[in-house]
Image (cartoon, rainbow, N blue to C red):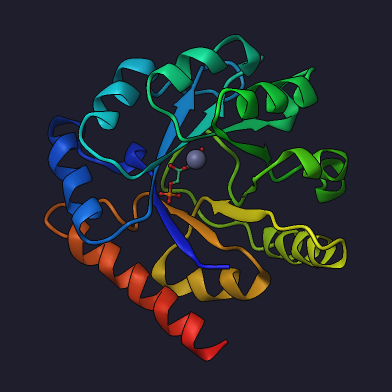
Amino acid sequence: MRSKLSPSILAADFLNLGEEIRQTDQAGTQYIHIDVMDGVFVPSISFGMPILSAVRNTTEKFLDVHLMIVNPERYIEEFVKCGADGITIHLEASECVEETLTQIKALGCKTGLSISPDTPVEALYPFLHLTDMILIMTVHPGYGGQKFIPECEEKVRKLRDYLNQNNMDVDIEVDGGIKLDNAKMILDAGANVIVAGSAVFEKEKTFENTQNFLELFRKWEEKK
Ligand code: DX5
Ligand code: ZN
């Protein structure tokens, strides 16, 4: 399973968003992470469809849309229309998880299911057969630039063991507080899609920061 980087544009300079995305794209990122927040599921409000469409027009990379919104089933079709390649919903935010994941798949998108730090990993087990990716939040969702919660590493390990035991090929994404200095630890635990916001988007360093993550992945894969 190849490791992939998913830089979160929440940390980008919005006045230069096109250039920021070009920098990480040209440095070789595989995904672009789009954090949609509704001010209800999480305290903050970020952005929605118009930004996703604009990003779609500037890159062909996989658009990894993370919906931190209640009742995400209301908006799946629209996010697909705006160019999402993968849509992740929160287990805590939907009363019809199974139907929503089925809908995402039917619309030709990759499916993702996420849990916040207080939700046990076992709560995901009934839905794994419907997911291409599980997103383990490693901070409380809502803001960029928070500190990684160390207890989340064990959840990743537990989930990867469970997936291996059941011969399931599901990506594990981690999101929140991931930097160059803790990325190896989380790859060792079994994650293979790494979201990084503030550790990638940085004035005049976005290209270099992206390359550094990809170099770390290459070295990690060589040693395996
Ligand atoms: C938090 C978001 C994250 C966040 C990551 O709710 O889902 O994607 O932007 O930012 P960093 O990498 O700065 O913690
Ligand atoms: Zn996110």
Q: Quadrant of the C terminus?
A: bottom right
Q: In which quarter of the image is residue 187?
A: bottom right
Q: Residue drawn 30% across and 56% down?
A: 200
Establish if 130 lies above or below 210. Answer: above
- Residue 64 visible in the picture: yes
Q: In which quarter of the image is the N terminus?
A: bottom right
In the shown orientation, is residue 26 left or right of residue 193? left
Which x, y percent locates residue 138? 60, 52
Q: Which residue is drawn at 56% across and 27% down?
A: 68
Tell me the quarter of the picture where residue 156 sits: bottom right
Question: Residue 165's spot in the image, x, y percent?
Answer: 87, 67
Q: Residue drawn at (34%, 76%), measured in percent from left and top? A: 215
The image position of residue 23, as x and y in percent, is 17, 52
Given residues 207 and 171, the one toward you in this image is 171
Answer whether residue 202 is visible to the viewer in this image. no
Q: Is 63 situated above or below 183?
A: above
